Amino acid sequence: MNLPLARPGARKEAILSLVPQCRLGAEIGADHGLISAHLLRENRCGHMVVSDISAASLAKARRLFLLHGLTARAALRVADGLDALCGLAEKPAAVVIAGMGAQSIAGILARGSEAWDGTAFVLQPNPDPPYLRRWLAAHGFAIEAERLAFEGGRYYVAMRARRGASDYTPKELLLGPCLLRDKPALWQPYLRWRRDCLRAARDTGPQTAWIEEEMAEEAGDGPDRL
Protein backbone atom coordinates (compact mmCIF):
# COMPACT_ATOMS: atom_id res chain seq x y z
CA MET A 1 0.00 0.00 0.00
CA ASN A 2 1.36 3.43 -1.00
CA LEU A 3 0.80 5.78 1.89
CA PRO A 4 0.45 9.55 1.34
CA LEU A 5 3.74 11.42 1.45
CA ALA A 6 4.22 14.27 3.86
CA ARG A 7 3.57 17.54 2.05
CA PRO A 8 6.74 19.43 1.20
CA GLY A 9 7.14 22.90 2.63
CA ALA A 10 7.42 26.01 0.49
CA ARG A 11 11.21 25.62 0.13
CA LYS A 12 10.96 22.08 -1.22
CA GLU A 13 8.00 23.04 -3.42
CA ALA A 14 10.21 25.65 -5.08
CA ILE A 15 12.90 23.04 -5.68
CA LEU A 16 10.45 20.47 -7.05
CA SER A 17 8.96 23.00 -9.46
CA LEU A 18 12.33 23.44 -11.17
CA VAL A 19 13.04 19.76 -11.86
CA PRO A 20 12.26 18.88 -15.50
CA GLN A 21 10.46 15.65 -16.28
CA CYS A 22 13.04 13.01 -17.09
CA ARG A 23 13.79 9.31 -17.08
CA LEU A 24 16.63 9.54 -14.55
CA GLY A 25 17.26 12.17 -11.90
CA ALA A 26 19.60 12.42 -8.94
CA GLU A 27 19.63 14.06 -5.52
CA ILE A 28 22.98 14.80 -3.90
CA GLY A 29 22.93 15.23 -0.12
CA ALA A 30 19.45 13.74 0.08
CA ASP A 31 19.26 13.18 3.85
CA HIS A 32 15.73 11.82 4.43
CA GLY A 33 14.97 11.67 0.69
CA LEU A 34 11.66 13.56 0.69
CA ILE A 35 12.47 15.53 -2.48
CA SER A 36 13.38 12.34 -4.36
CA ALA A 37 10.27 10.58 -3.05
CA HIS A 38 8.02 13.36 -4.36
CA LEU A 39 9.77 13.38 -7.74
CA LEU A 40 9.16 9.64 -8.03
CA ARG A 41 5.59 9.72 -6.72
CA GLU A 42 4.64 12.53 -9.12
CA ASN A 43 6.41 10.69 -11.97
CA ARG A 44 8.53 13.76 -12.60
CA CYS A 45 11.48 11.37 -12.63
CA GLY A 46 11.18 7.74 -13.66
CA HIS A 47 14.10 6.68 -11.46
CA MET A 48 16.35 8.48 -8.96
CA VAL A 49 19.92 8.12 -7.78
CA VAL A 50 19.72 9.17 -4.14
CA SER A 51 22.97 9.88 -2.32
CA ASP A 52 24.34 11.25 0.90
CA ILE A 53 27.78 11.25 2.47
CA SER A 54 26.24 9.87 5.67
CA ALA A 55 25.08 6.26 5.75
CA ALA A 56 22.86 7.06 8.75
CA SER A 57 21.13 9.84 6.84
CA LEU A 58 20.65 7.64 3.79
CA ALA A 59 19.07 4.97 5.97
CA LYS A 60 16.23 7.43 6.64
CA ALA A 61 15.64 7.75 2.91
CA ARG A 62 15.69 3.97 2.51
CA ARG A 63 12.96 3.62 5.15
CA LEU A 64 10.88 6.33 3.46
CA PHE A 65 11.08 4.66 0.03
CA LEU A 66 10.21 1.29 1.54
CA LEU A 67 7.20 2.73 3.34
CA HIS A 68 5.86 4.32 0.16
CA GLY A 69 6.62 1.57 -2.31
CA LEU A 70 9.35 3.46 -4.16
CA THR A 71 12.36 1.23 -3.46
CA ALA A 72 12.49 -0.33 -6.92
CA ARG A 73 12.86 3.08 -8.56
CA ALA A 74 15.59 4.48 -6.28
CA ALA A 75 19.30 3.61 -6.28
CA LEU A 76 20.77 4.67 -2.93
CA ARG A 77 24.48 5.42 -2.73
CA VAL A 78 26.68 6.56 0.14
CA ALA A 79 29.07 8.92 -1.62
CA ASP A 80 30.72 12.33 -1.52
CA GLY A 81 29.03 14.75 -3.91
CA LEU A 82 28.92 13.87 -7.59
CA ASP A 83 31.00 10.75 -6.95
CA ALA A 84 27.59 9.12 -6.48
CA LEU A 85 27.06 9.32 -10.25
CA CYS A 86 30.30 7.63 -11.27
CA GLY A 87 29.89 4.44 -13.26
CA LEU A 88 26.27 5.03 -14.26
CA ALA A 89 25.27 3.70 -17.67
CA GLU A 90 23.04 6.74 -18.14
CA LYS A 91 23.75 10.32 -17.15
CA PRO A 92 20.99 11.91 -15.01
CA ALA A 93 19.06 14.59 -16.87
CA ALA A 94 18.45 16.50 -13.63
CA VAL A 95 20.58 16.74 -10.47
CA VAL A 96 19.24 18.32 -7.27
CA ILE A 97 21.69 19.77 -4.73
CA ALA A 98 19.75 21.61 -2.05
CA GLY A 99 19.81 22.82 1.53
CA MET A 100 23.58 23.42 1.72
CA GLY A 101 25.74 26.49 1.86
CA ALA A 102 26.50 28.16 -1.46
CA GLN A 103 30.21 27.39 -1.10
CA SER A 104 29.47 23.72 -0.40
CA ILE A 105 27.32 23.46 -3.54
CA ALA A 106 29.99 25.21 -5.61
CA GLY A 107 32.60 22.81 -4.22
CA ILE A 108 30.50 19.79 -5.20
CA LEU A 109 30.12 21.10 -8.74
CA ALA A 110 33.81 21.96 -8.97
CA ARG A 111 34.82 18.44 -7.95
CA GLY A 112 32.54 16.83 -10.54
CA SER A 113 34.63 15.14 -13.21
CA GLU A 114 31.98 15.06 -15.95
CA ALA A 115 31.28 17.76 -18.51
CA TRP A 116 27.56 17.66 -17.64
CA ASP A 117 26.48 19.20 -20.95
CA GLY A 118 22.67 19.26 -21.04
CA THR A 119 22.18 18.27 -17.39
CA ALA A 120 19.85 20.53 -15.41
CA PHE A 121 21.27 21.36 -11.97
CA VAL A 122 18.56 22.38 -9.51
CA LEU A 123 20.32 24.20 -6.70
CA GLN A 124 19.09 25.72 -3.45
CA PRO A 125 21.89 27.50 -1.60
CA ASN A 126 21.32 28.17 2.05
CA PRO A 127 22.37 30.94 2.40
CA ASP A 128 24.16 33.34 -0.03
CA PRO A 129 22.63 32.78 -3.49
CA PRO A 130 24.73 35.69 -4.92
CA TYR A 131 27.91 33.71 -4.20
CA LEU A 132 26.57 30.70 -6.08
CA ARG A 133 25.40 32.84 -9.02
CA ARG A 134 28.88 34.37 -9.30
CA TRP A 135 30.49 30.94 -9.19
CA LEU A 136 28.15 29.52 -11.83
CA ALA A 137 28.73 32.46 -14.17
CA ALA A 138 32.50 32.19 -13.73
CA HIS A 139 32.54 28.45 -14.43
CA GLY A 140 30.48 28.18 -17.59
CA PHE A 141 26.92 27.82 -16.31
CA ALA A 142 23.83 29.81 -17.26
CA ILE A 143 20.89 30.28 -14.89
CA GLU A 144 17.66 29.52 -16.72
CA ALA A 145 15.05 29.71 -13.93
CA GLU A 146 14.73 30.84 -10.31
CA ARG A 147 12.08 30.52 -7.61
CA LEU A 148 11.43 32.34 -4.33
CA ALA A 149 9.99 30.68 -1.23
CA PHE A 150 9.16 31.89 2.26
CA GLU A 151 9.27 29.39 5.10
CA GLY A 152 10.05 29.55 8.79
CA GLY A 153 10.44 33.32 8.83
CA ARG A 154 13.03 33.54 6.06
CA TYR A 155 13.30 33.59 2.27
CA TYR A 156 14.91 30.94 0.11
CA VAL A 157 16.07 31.04 -3.51
CA ALA A 158 16.14 27.97 -5.75
CA MET A 159 17.64 28.04 -9.22
CA ARG A 160 18.14 25.82 -12.25
CA ALA A 161 21.38 26.06 -14.21
CA ARG A 162 22.95 24.30 -17.18
CA ARG A 163 26.24 24.52 -19.01
CA GLY A 164 26.15 27.57 -21.25
CA ALA A 165 27.35 31.11 -21.81
CA SER A 166 26.15 33.88 -19.50
CA ASP A 167 26.80 37.57 -19.00
CA TYR A 168 25.24 38.99 -15.84
CA THR A 169 25.42 42.45 -14.35
CA PRO A 170 26.42 42.86 -10.69
CA LYS A 171 22.78 43.65 -9.90
CA GLU A 172 21.63 40.43 -11.59
CA LEU A 173 24.19 38.43 -9.63
CA LEU A 174 22.89 39.97 -6.40
CA LEU A 175 19.15 39.64 -6.98
CA GLY A 176 18.92 36.96 -9.67
CA PRO A 177 18.59 37.47 -13.44
CA CYS A 178 15.37 35.46 -13.65
CA LEU A 179 13.84 36.97 -10.51
CA LEU A 180 14.56 40.45 -11.84
CA ARG A 181 12.88 39.52 -15.09
CA ASP A 182 9.88 37.63 -13.69
CA LYS A 183 9.26 39.62 -10.47
CA PRO A 184 7.35 36.83 -8.64
CA ALA A 185 4.64 37.42 -6.07
CA LEU A 186 7.15 37.43 -3.19
CA TRP A 187 9.43 39.91 -4.93
CA GLN A 188 8.67 43.07 -2.94
CA PRO A 189 8.80 41.43 0.53
CA TYR A 190 11.96 39.63 -0.53
CA LEU A 191 13.58 42.90 -1.57
CA ARG A 192 12.68 44.48 1.78
CA TRP A 193 14.11 41.47 3.62
CA ARG A 194 17.34 41.59 1.59
CA ARG A 195 17.66 45.34 2.22
CA ASP A 196 17.08 44.90 5.96
CA CYS A 197 19.72 42.14 6.10
CA LEU A 198 22.25 44.44 4.42
CA ARG A 199 21.38 47.30 6.74
CA ALA A 200 21.79 45.05 9.77
CA ALA A 201 25.25 44.18 8.44
CA ARG A 202 25.90 47.94 8.01
CA ASP A 203 26.31 47.48 4.24
CA THR A 204 25.38 50.82 2.72
CA GLY A 205 27.20 50.23 -0.56
CA PRO A 206 25.86 49.67 -4.07
CA GLN A 207 23.97 46.49 -3.14
CA THR A 208 21.53 48.39 -0.93
CA ALA A 209 21.17 51.05 -3.62
CA TRP A 210 20.34 48.42 -6.28
CA ILE A 211 17.65 46.91 -4.07
CA GLU A 212 16.10 50.27 -3.29
CA GLU A 213 16.21 51.16 -6.98
CA GLU A 214 14.28 48.00 -7.80
CA MET A 215 11.79 48.66 -5.00
CA ALA A 216 11.17 52.19 -6.31
CA GLU A 217 10.63 50.94 -9.87
CA GLU A 218 8.13 48.36 -8.67
CA ALA A 219 6.30 51.01 -6.66
CA GLY A 220 5.98 53.19 -9.76
CA ASP A 221 8.59 55.75 -8.78
CA GLY A 222 11.26 54.77 -11.29
CA PRO A 223 12.50 57.10 -14.04
CA ASP A 224 10.38 55.36 -16.68
CA ARG A 225 7.12 55.86 -14.78
CA LEU A 226 5.00 59.01 -15.11
Image (cartoon, grey):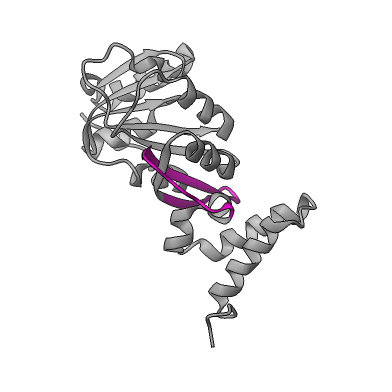
Q: Position of residue 208 (x, y in %)?
A: 69, 59
- Magenta: predominant secondary structure element? strand
Q: Relative to 92, say whether 216 is above or below.
A: below
Q: Which residue is drawn at 31% across and 33% down?
A: 119
Q: Can residue 184 be seen in this view?
A: no
Quarter of the picture containing the C terminus is bottom right
Left or right of 69? Residue 137 is: right
Q: Quadrant of residue 103?
A: top right
- In this view, the residue in front, 66 or 73, is 73
Percent across and percent down for residue 74 are 27, 21
In the picture, residue 77 is in which quadrant? Answer: top left
Compared across the picture, whether 197 is left or right of 7 comes to right
Vertically, is 26 above or below 126?
Answer: above
The question of residue 159 being in magenta is answered with: yes
Give coordinates of residue 203: x percent, y percent: 76, 53
Q: Nearer the viewer, residue 92 or 206?
A: 206
What residue is rendered at 38% in x and 43% in y? 7
* Residue occupying image coordinates x 46% and y 64%: 185
Furthest-bottom residue in this view: 226
Q: Which of the 4 quarters of the picture holds residue 15?
A: top left
Left or right of 60? Residue 104 is: right
**Vertical placement of residue 128 versus 203, above or below:** above
Could you tell me residue 101's position as x and y percent?
A: 57, 33
Q: Which residue lies furthest to the right in this view?
A: 202
Q: Is residue 165 magenta?
A: yes
Q: Quadrant of the N terminus?
A: top left
Q: What stretch is highlighted in magenta?
A: 146-170
